[in-house]
Image (spheres, grey):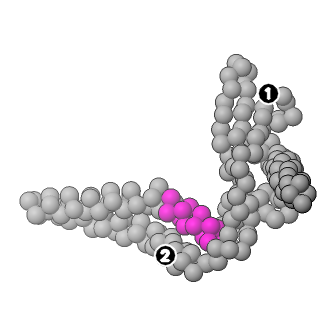
Amino acid sequence: MKRNLLLLVSFVVLSSFTWQDTFKDRMRTAVTPYVEAELGIDLKKKENILTIVGIDTLTEKNRLYIKGQDLLEELQVGYLPFIELQRHAVNQYMLLYKIHPVANVRTEIDKAVREYSEIEAKAAPLIKELEEVIAKEKTADDKQFVAYKVSALLHIRNQDRIIKTDTLGIIVSKDLQVIKRKDFIKN
């Protein structure tokens, strides 16, 4: 009895490793054309190697988190520094106007306030969307599978025989089709 149980457990464990390896192989086959097309490299060459190091499942909550991160990055890079600079410029012009109440300084204040308002107005829809995404994320489903996140290492040897290593994060659908990040977070 113990022997049969040991054989059964061994079979199950070995089978799970085999399934894992074949799933990684299938995932590598699915992402290879995408990586070749996007990066313009030939993975058929022996010196270029794509290794799948991890496969995670993504849920709706993960999708909303990724979307929120992208919106936050867009705000931090595209708007917030300029809003801060304009706010600083307005404050400096106000201080200057207190010292020297001259008409051209007042004109500069008005111009800086107008530019500040324009930048803030452009950022407002992104801020609103980010707030909506954060609110949705709090109640989003964190159990239902949406897609896979494939983590991979890419080793490329260039003409000088130097090996460059990079990490990749690729989103793959249930049917093993690569989904571009912007399409994944669009919904």
Is residue 174 shown above or below 140? above
Badge 2 density bin: few <14, some 14–19, many ≥20, Cα 10 Å: some
Q: Which mark is residue 47?
A: 1
Q: Which mark is residue 123?
A: none
Q: Which mark is residue 131?
A: 2
Q: Is residue 13 left or right of residue 186?
A: right
Badge 1 density bin: few <14, some 14–19, many ≥20, Cα 10 Å: few
Residue drawn at the location 66% of the way across and 30% of the way down: 164
Is residue 73 shown above or below 160? below
In this view, which residue lies farthest toward the top? 160
- Mark 1 and mark 2 lie on one chain; the one further toward the N terminus is 1
Residue drawn at the location 77% of the way across and 59% of the way down: 172
- What amino acid type is highlighted by mark number 2? Glu
- Residue 17 seen: yes
Quadrant into which the C terminus falls: bottom right
Magenta-drawn segment: 60-73
